[in-house]
Image (spheres, rainbow, N blue to C red):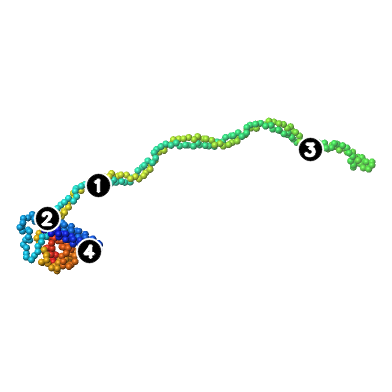
Amino acid sequence: MNSKIKLGIATATISAALAGCNTTQPKSDLASQLQAAEQENSQLRSEVAQLERSVASMKSQPEGSSSLLPPAAKAGECYARAFVPPKYKPISKTVLKREASARVETIPARYEWVEQKVLTREASQQLKVIPAKYGWKEEQVLVREASTKLVEQPAVYENVEEKILVREGYTTWKKGRGPIERIDNATGEIMCLVEVPPQYKTVIKKVVKTPASVREVEIPAEYKTVKRRVVIEPAKTVTVDVPEQYKTVKVRKMAEKPQERRIEIPAEYQEVSDQVLVSDGHLEWRPILCETNTSADVVRKLQMALREGGYNPGPIDGVIGHETMAAVNAYQKANGLASGQLTMETLRKLKVI
């Protein structure tokens, strides 16, 4: 029995390889078919392992046991051992999704803008130079010293009237006109001897009143009034106190310090669905479709039903080939049916019979 199962698997593997080696198909189709064949082989290997476990359990039973033959068999029907998958019972249970924990939440510090006086310059002392004060002062400046000089005093003249004899007195003969006038014998005229007085002339004469002289004259010193810039108050240095200086600025100040708050997070649970094994997978006699109770028409109906159900049975040719059996096995597993054989249960489920 064990060798037959292994042979069946080997045949299925070779058939899958041959089906994928069709050179008329594109390489992408060949690759996908090879991948599908590998998946089917893997499924077949797991089924073989389960079948081997079932065969081993059957061998442990005593000979003559009724489980070695189909129970309540009917004439004209074929039976084969099919693998009945394990049965599970769905249950709901509460599981811990997340353990209880704590989260530390940090509340950041809060800041605000406030006006604050900031010292920009400290109090100090500095030396201040007070410049000298100047003014104008009038003063007599000696231009020329006192001295003496000889001054020539000219003569002083004055005008005086003086009679100057211009002509001295004399006597002269003049013609007379009277009886006492002398008669010139020659001419018979009367000639008179007349005394002419001296003639004077009054002239203004410049005479020295005061003779010229030389005298020593004192020349006083000569001064000039000038304005001179004089120091009224000399320059000096004084110590001046410089007060401290502040400036009002806006500063960002912490109003509240940062805080930490511990938040307890309770454990979280969730309801999950699970399955509890009710019975293990095992081999069981089931009526199957065989040569005595099948026809090509039934196989075609089977292939069409599989295709309508979304399974690929290969060509609809009425022949149970590798692809058809692979589709049957996939359908059986998806619906929790006994697998490994084309059972009547599967045909009824597909509404073929």
Which comes before the other along the chain, label 4 or label 2?
4
| Residue 194 at x, y percent in the picture | 88, 38
Q: Are marks 3 and 1 in contact (CB under 8 Å)?
A: no
- Residue 64 visible in the snapshot: yes
Q: Secondary structure at mark 3?
A: strand
Q: Secondary structure at mark 1?
A: strand
Mark carried by residue 22: 4
Is residue 106 found left or right of 170 in the rendered image? left
Question: Which of 137 and 43 lies nearest the eye of the viewer?
Answer: 43
- Give the CA separation, mark 1 to mark 2: 58 Å
Q: Which amino acid type is shown beneath numbered disc 4? A: Asn
Q: Which amino acid type is shown beneath numbered disc 1? A: Glu
| Residue positioned most to the bottom | 297
Q: Which residue is mark 3?
A: 203
Using a 10 Å C-alpha cutoff, classify the residue at mark 2 as few (fewer than 14 neighbours), some (14 to 19) or many (20 or more).
Answer: some
Q: Which residue is mark 1?
A: 105
Q: Quadrant of residue 245?
A: top left
Q: Which amino acid type is shown beneath numbered disc 3? A: Val
Is residue 266 found left or right of 191 in the rendered image? left
- Give the CA separation, mark 3 to mark 1: 151 Å
Instruction: Between label 2 and label 3, give the one nearer the viewer.
Output: 2
